[in-house]
Amino acid sequence: MSRILVTFLVVAASYSPSFSQTPSEVRVRVLDYRNALPARGRKVGLVVAPANAKNDNWLIAKTNRDGVASFRISGSLRQTLRVDPEAGSLANWSCTRSNAEFDFSGVLDLETSEVLQHGVVGELTNHPLCQHHTSSTLTARPGEIVVYTRHLNPWLTVRRFMHEVFNG
């Protein structure tokens, strides 16, 4: 009987770290900058690499008809979440203010604990491509990040491409 009990305790102790890491869900709600309506079919990127990783591993998801891209992450999360509302798409422009004053990359660095406990609503940026926007006040649910984007027409997409090619 004691052998069975010892075997059970050894097996339970070896599996305990996997039980303590519950999966987390982070939702990114993408809204149109003009009217705050859901932006469906947009790509969104999220970094899920551990804090000590040398390279960032981006997860990419598309928004559903409600403008929400969901990321289910197992394991421990890093202290800061990196969110890219454009996910490398030249046709999308982030109208959400980034943390750096002159950073127009659209990538946001957010505190993981703040996102998971309260949710975060991004601020609209004061960029010429994001003028004439809505001024509605929104709230985010725990585990949710709200961002604003603009879908660029073909001419603005070409201009953006040329600007990035020649200006880095």
Image (cartoon, helix red, strand yellow):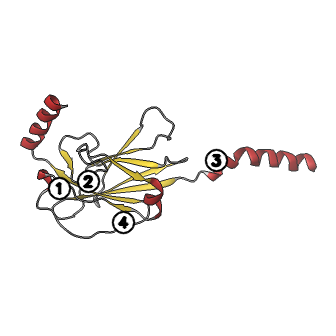
Q: Is residue 113 above or below residue 155?
A: below
Q: Residues within 10 Å of mark 2 (few under 14, many from 20)?
A: many
Q: Which residue is mark 1?
A: 126
Q: Which residue is mark 4?
A: 140
The picture places residue 78, in percent across and down from the top left corner, at 49, 46
Gap in angstroms between the C-alphas marked 4 and 3: 30 Å
Q: Secondary structure at mark 4?
A: loop
Res 97 label: 2
Gap in angstroms between the C-alphas marked 2 and 4: 16 Å
Point out the frontmost of discs 3 and 1.
Answer: 1
Q: Residues within 10 Å of mark 3 (few under 14, many from 20)?
A: few
Gap in angstroms between the C-alphas marked 3 and 1: 45 Å
Residue furthest to the front: 101
Q: Residues within 10 Å of mark 4 (few under 14, many from 20)?
A: some
**Of residues 139 and 105, the one drawn nearer to the viewer in this rendering:** 105
Contact between labelled residues 3 and 2, with CB atoms less than 8 Å apart: no
Residue 139 placement, left or right of 73: left
